[in-house]
Amino acid sequence: MDKSHVIQMNGVHGNGVLTAGVRQVSVRGVLDPAKLKSRRQRSWGVRASEMSKNTLNPIRAIVDGMKLTPNPDKPMISLSIGDPTVFGNMPTDDKVLQAMKEAIDSQKYNGYAPSVGYQKSREAVANFYSRPGAPLEAKDVILTSGCSQAIELCINVLCNPGDNILVPCPGFSLYKTLAVSLGVQVKLYNLLPEKSWEVDLQHLESLIDSRTACLIVTNPSNPCGSVYSKEHLQNIISVASKHCIPILADEIYGDMVFPDCSFHPMAPLSSDVPILSCGGLAKRWLVPGWRMGWILIHDRNNVFGSEIREGLVKLSQRILGACTIVQGALESIFNNTPHEFYQSTVSFIKANSEICYSALSTVPGLTPVMPSGAMYLMVGIDMDNFPEFQNDVDFTERLVTEQSVFCLPATAFEYPDFFRVVVTVPEDMMMEACARIREFCARHYRPCSTDSNEIDQ
Ligand SMILES: Cc1ncc(COP(=O)(O)O)c(C=O)c1O
C-alpha cells in the first residue's frame, strides 16, 4: 500500500480523503526509479517565447546594425536621443523636485496603490486635463508606467490578433513594436512633409477595412515636431467617424508648442468618436525617467461603455503600473509648476529649432522641415546628390565616422531619406553640429546632371 502524506493547503485539513484544499502525495511514486529515469530523458530546451521573438524595436534594429565609430579628433555630439535630460541643460523645475521630496518624506506612498492609481492622483490628472466639451472625472483616468504603458494598454484593449491599426508614417516606432508582438497588423498612413506633416487623409481612408481596430494620431509629433490645426484634427476625426474607428491620441507632447502656435487636444473636438488620450510627465515636465503616464478615457455615446473601461482596469492589473511616489507628487506638480517653466522650455526648443533650421536650409542637398512643437526636426536628404551613399542609414553612419555627429536615420521611423535631429541639446552644440553637417555635405555633395546643365546655362 502507498504511504500517503496529507498536506494542508489553505489551512484545510483532511484525513487521507481528498477534500477541498487537500492533496495526497505518494511517496513511493515520487521515488519510483522508472519515473525518475523518464524525467531525466527530457533534455534541456529552454526557448524564448514566440512573443519575445516577435518583439522588435526598429530603432534598436537599425542603430545596432550601424558602425558608429566617431572621428577621434572631434568630440561626439549625439542628436539622436529623445531624452531632454541627457546634456543637463534642461533640468526640471524646483517645484517638481519639491513635490517629489515631500511625497517621499510623507511616507504615505511606500505601499501598493490600486492598479489604476490612487483615487486622489487620478482626480488630480482629471482636474488638470478637463476641458469644456471633454470633462474628466477620476474614473476616466488610468495611471500607467510612462506613456509607453498607456499606449500598450490601449492597443491591448482595442485589438485582437488579426486586427490592424493605422499608424502615422513617419511615426513613433513603439506602436509597431507593441502591435506586432500581439499579432496585430500595422498599416502606415502617410504624412506630407510639404504640408507641415499633415495627414494624407485620402491615403488614411484607403487603408481602412473591417479589421481596423484603431487609429493612432501623434500630435505634436515625434519625429516630425508638427502640430496640427483644429481644422485638420477635425478632418481626421471625420474619417474615423465615417468608419466608426476609435482614436488613440498620443498627446505626450501636448502643450509643448511654440508660442505662435496652439495645441488642440483631440477629445474636445470629437462629438461621436471615442478617444483614448495618452500622456505623461516625461516630456513637458522633463522627467522621462520617473515613468509616469496616463490614459484619459473620453467616451462618446457610450461606445466604449463599461467593456473598454473594465478591459483597461483588468489589463492594468497585470502589473501594478505607476510609481506610487510620483503619484503622490502629481497634484502638487500640476498645481505648483510655474508657467515660466513651461514657457522657457518651449522658447529654448524653438530657438534651437530655428538655429538648426536656418543653418541646414542653406546646405545644398538638405531640406529641413521647420517644426512647431515637440523636440524634433526632420531633415530630408536629396540622395541623388549624394551618390556615395546608398540611403539615410549609410549617410548618417558616415556623418559619425567623419564628423562625430549622430542623427537618427528616419528609416527607423519607416521613412527613408530623412534624418531626425533632437533639438534639446545645448545651443553651442547645436551650432557646432550644424557646422559639421554643412562641412560633411559640402564634401560629399555632387550636383545631379540636370543641376549641372542649369549651372552650365
Ligand atoms: C510620441 C511618443 N509617445 C510616447 C512616448 C513614451 O513616453 P514615456 O517615456 O512616458 O513612456 C514617447 C517617448 O519618446 C514618444 O515620443
Image (spheres, rainbow, N blue to C red):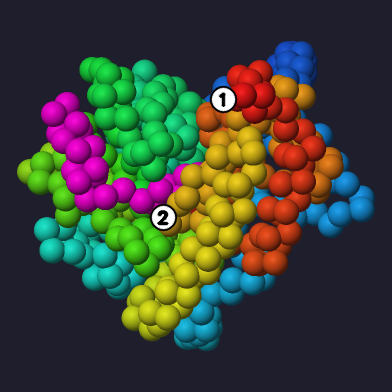
Secondary structure found at label 1: loop
Which circle, 1 or 2, is nearer the viewer? 2
Drawn side of residue 341 relative to residue 131, left or right: right
Residue 4, horizontal then vertical, whole percent: 58, 32
Residue indicated by mark 2? 372
Residue 86, horizontal then vertical, whole percent: 67, 63
Q: How many marks?
A: 2
Quarter of the rendering occupied by the N terminus: top right
Which mark, residue 355? none
Q: Residue at x 64, y 72 (%)?
A: 89
Which mark, residue 54? 1
Splitting the image into 4 quarters, where does residue 18 fall?
top left
Pointer 1 or 2: first along the chain = 1
Residue 182, horizontal then vertical, whole percent: 45, 27
Q: Nearer the viewer, residue 216 or 332?
A: 216
**Residue 73 seen in the figure:** yes
